[in-house]
């Protein structure tokens, strides 16, 4: 059976060489004792299984921890296996999320040669970034991250910036965007800082910022991004919101009507339905004992897939539902451990849509017209 879905490798599990104090996943405090990587038979079985069942397109995200700790030989083995099992006309894309401090010429040449999209974690200018993104000795990582980014730029590697929005920078939205524009960074993504462990998705999410703060952050950054109707940067959230105004299905899973088919693979071979659902309750099995298609057929996956469409009453009556789609199930946990509450950031989204709606309509109108024109030309 072939169908479109993506996979995310937790390449080295939670092993990481930084000790960011807000990390919701890694608990090694920047001192991994022994870096974990998928054993060769697990790596090969997953890639063979995936590339034979995912249809004409394949999307693999390599995350951690810090996935570059797996080493360049590991990733050379990855692309060799991909070349063996991905047959034309399949379109295969690899993306990797890194803290950036290990990037050197060899890594950059590899990313360029094999067309990896590189996501680099950066929380803004030095003072903001170094307030939380430190190594095991408490030293800031900004200078090392920027050095890694410079190497990517020198080798024409496609990269984007992932910024965690927390108390350290939530009040600096305009400053962040202006800094990134000055640096020539064209692709930026924001993610609110979470204070929970993904290993406990049955507990109410504890966020480091309030919905009110995040709503103001979205409004502040939107003002800078909009540029009198001529945006010159890609902010992933704003791009996806605009897609919903144009009538195009958004890329972000949180803005879809249901969670798209997706599997997370731990370095051990354990399978889960989502990066935020890594608790034993949501384990789908292990690749040593099943296929990836088997994982989609489990009762656990069916239970996971049923959560997002089961919207709270407030969402069903909301005028912004067609743009928001209820947010992320992980953010909808109530005090009883049920995923039946509105998204924690619901009021932030309500404020943002009310604030930006008119300008989003202005941007979307010519895009809709052009889309309609192309549709007529195809008739």
Image (spheres, rainbow, N blue to C red):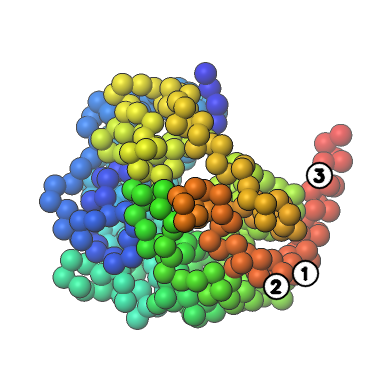
The numbered mark, 2 or 3, whose residue comes first in the sequence reads 2
Q: Nearer the viewer, mark 3 or mark 1?
A: 1
Please tell me whether residue 175 is drawn above or below residue 211 in the rendered image.
below
Label 3 residue SS: helix
The residue under label 1 is 358
Q: Residue at x 37, y 38 (%)?
A: 281
Neighbours of disc 3 within 10 Å: few (<14), some (14-19), many (20+):
few
Is 260 placed left or right of 153 in the picture?
right
Neighbours of disc 1 within 10 Å: few (<14), some (14-19), many (20+):
few
Q: Residue at x 50, y 71 (%)?
A: 210
Residue 267 location, quadrant = top left
Q: x, y (%) of residue 178? A: 52, 78
Is 77 placed left or right of 2 in the picture?
left
Quadrant including the C terminus: top right
The residue under label 3 is 374
Is 343 placed left or right of 355 in the picture?
left
Label 2 residue SS: helix
**Residue 16 visible in the current orientation:** no
C-alpha separation, residue under disc 3 versus residue under disc 1: 25 Å
Q: Residue at x 60, y 62 (%)?
A: 346
Q: Nearer the viewer, mark 2 or mark 1?
A: 2
The residue under label 2 is 355
């Amino acid at each position: 059976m072939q169908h479109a879905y993506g996979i995310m490798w937790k390449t080295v599990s939670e092993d990481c060489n930084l000790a960011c104090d807000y990390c919701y996943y890694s608990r090694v405090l920047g001192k991994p004792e022994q870096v974990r990587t998928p054993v060769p038979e697990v790596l090969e079985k997953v890639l063979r299984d995936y590339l034979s069942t995912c249809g004409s397109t394949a999307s693999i995200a390599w995350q951690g921890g810090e996935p570059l700790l797996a080493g360049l030989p590991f990733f050379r083995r990855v692309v060799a296996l991909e070349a063996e099992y991905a047959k034309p006309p399949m379109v295969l894309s690899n993306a990797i999320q890194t803290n950036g401090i290990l990037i050197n010429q060899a890594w950059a040449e590899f990313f360029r040669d094999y067309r990896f999209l590189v996501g680099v974690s950066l929380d803004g200018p030095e003072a903001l970034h170094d307030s939380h993104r430190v190594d095991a000795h408490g030293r800031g990582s900004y200078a090392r991250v920027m050095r890694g980014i410079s190497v990517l730029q020198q080798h024409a590697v496609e990269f984007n910036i992932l910024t965690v929005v927390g108390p350290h920078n939530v009040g600096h939205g305009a400053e962040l965007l202006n800094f990134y524009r000055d640096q020539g960074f064209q692709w930026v993504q924001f993610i609110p800082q979470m204070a929970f462990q993904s290993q406990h998705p049955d507990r109410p999410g504890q966020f480091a910022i309030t919905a009110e703060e995040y709503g103001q952050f979205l409004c502040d950054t939107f003002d800078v991004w909009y540029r009198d109707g001529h945006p010159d940067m890609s902010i992933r959230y704003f791009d996806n919101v605009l897609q919903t105004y144009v009538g195009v299905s958004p890329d972000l899973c949180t803005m879809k009507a249901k969670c798209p088919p997706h599997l997370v693979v731990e370095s051990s071979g354990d399978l889960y339905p989502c990066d935020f659902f890594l608790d034993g309750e949501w384990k789908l099995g292990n690749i040593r004992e099943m296929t990836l298609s088997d994982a989609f057929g489990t009762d656990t996956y069916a239970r996971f897939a049923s959560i997002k469409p089961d919207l709270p009453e407030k969402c069903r009556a909301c005028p912004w539902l067609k743009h928001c789609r209820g947010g992320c199930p992980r953010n909808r946990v109530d005090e009883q451990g049920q995923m039946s509450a509105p998204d924690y950031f619901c009021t932030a989204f309500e404020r943002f849509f009310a604030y930006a709606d008119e300008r989003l309509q202005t941007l979307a109108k010519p895009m809709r017209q052009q889309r309609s024109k192309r549709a007529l030309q195809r008739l």
